[in-house]
Image: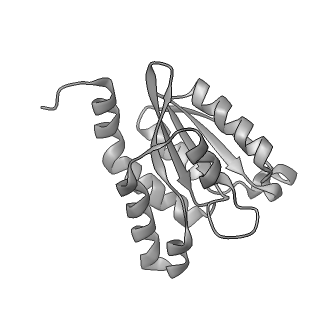
Amino acid sequence: MTTAHLVVVSDRAVADPAENRAAPVVAGALTAQGIESSVSIVPNEPEQVRAALQAAVRMADLVITFGGTGVRPGDCVVDLTHELGLVELPGIAEEIRRLGAVRTPASLLSRGTCGLVADGSRPVLVLNCPSSRGGAKDVAQVLGQVLGHLLRDLEGTERS
């Protein structure tokens, strides 16, 4: 069974978990695809984000982060994701930005990335996402379209 771990990077959500508005949207979409997910909430502090990312890669097949992907001072999630040795799958993040730009041009400011990280003998998909509910809906839509294909390819299952 495929597992996911969602890492919410938000000082506000640490103080008040109700501020975690995006992760529940994606968690629901993953559940609909038969994927179990867990969530951790960490402050936007590089060492804590780094530790959360490293732990998530060890525990799950799919790691999705929320927040810290823009150009604000202190946004560090994308840089720390690259530190994991990410092999990019750029089309996924590009499609999320494209969908978001239909509603708000500000989505084009996202530096969010997507790709594979090697954890021992298995690849782990890591996806950086916006922290907004609208952005999360875009993420859920894109994952709904490609996640089954991606997981099949990672397992080496033949296409029919």
- Quarter occupied by residue 115: top left
In the picture as drawn, the residue positioned furthest to the right comes out as: 15
Is residue 2 at least partly visible in the picture? yes
Q: Residue at x 65, y 70 (%)?
A: 71
* Residue 35 or residue 92, whichever sits in front: 92
* Residue 23 or residue 118, whichever sits in front: 118
Task: Name the quarter where the N terminus is drawn.
Answer: top left
Q: Position of residue 60 (x, y in %)?
A: 55, 28
In the picture as drawn, the residue positioned furthest to the left comes out as: 160
Q: Position of residue 26 (x, y in %)?
A: 53, 49
The way the protein has been coloured in the rendering is one colour
Q: Residue at x 46, y 49 (%)?
A: 114
Q: Position of residue 136 (x, y in %)?
A: 54, 58
Q: Residue at x 55, y 63 (%)?
A: 111
Residue 73 falls left or right of residue 22: right
Q: Position of residue 86 (x, y in %)?
A: 49, 42
For residue 3, above or below residue 86? above
Q: Residue at x 23, y 24 (%)?
A: 157
Is residue 1 at least partly visible in the picture? no
In the picture as drawn, the residue positioned furthest to the bottom comes out as: 105
